[in-house]
Image (cartoon, grey):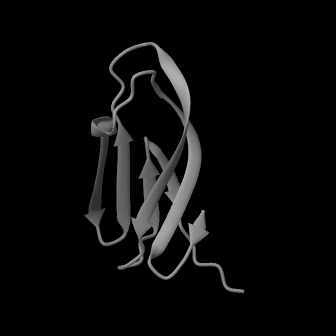
């Protein structure tokens, strides 16, 4: 995760359809503290993708649900 004043950037790898299109991504905010990102898979032929997701940090959220996996956010003090 990379943080800046506008939000966070998450870089990760995921197996998605070989012919994956950006329309197969759904993202929404459940409340002020939870962001959900889902990937639709339509066929069994999969490829490994490197993905980047930018999330605005205001209001600050504490939970990112990324394709069913919960990632709890915690502020880190220097």
Spot occupied by residue 50 in the image (x, y as percentages of width and height): 57, 40
Location of residue 78 with respect to 17 vertically, above or below:
below
User: Is residue 37 rendered to the left or right of residue 3?
Assistant: left
User: In the rendered image, which quarter is residue 2 located in?
Assistant: bottom right
User: Is residue 15 rendered to the left or right of residue 32?
Assistant: right
Instruction: Tell me the quarter of the image containing the C terminus.
Output: bottom right
Residue shown at 53%/23% (left/top)?
A: 47
Seen from the viewer's position, the closer of residues 24 and 67 is 24
Instruction: Tell me the quarter of the image containing the N terminus.
Output: bottom right
Location of residue 76 with respect to 28 vertically, above or below:
below
Seen from the viewer's position, the closer of residues 3 and 37 is 3
Spot occupied by residue 34 in the image (x, y as percentages of width and height): 36, 63
Spot occupied by residue 28 in the image (x, y as percentages of width and height): 27, 56
Residue shown at 46%/13% (left/top)?
A: 45
Extreme residue in the bottom direction:
78
Location of residue 75 with respect to 13 vertically, above or below:
below
Extreme residue in the right direction:
78
User: In the rendered image, which quarter is residue 64 located in?
Assistant: bottom left
Spot occupied by residue 48 in the image (x, y as percentages of width and height): 57, 29
Residue shown at 37%/79% (left/top)?
A: 58
Residue shown at 51%/51% (left/top)?
A: 52
Image mark count: 0
């Amino acid at each position: 995760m990379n943080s800046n004043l506008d939000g966070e950037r998450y870089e990760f790898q995921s197996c998605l359809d070989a012919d994956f299109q950006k329309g197969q991504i759904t993202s929404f905010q459940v409340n002020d503290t939870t962001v959900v990102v889902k990937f639709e898979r339509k066929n069994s032929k999969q490829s490994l993708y490197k993905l980047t997701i930018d999330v605005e940090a205001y209001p600050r959220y504490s939970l990112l649900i990324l394709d069913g996996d919960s990632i709890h956010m915690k502020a880190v003090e220097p």
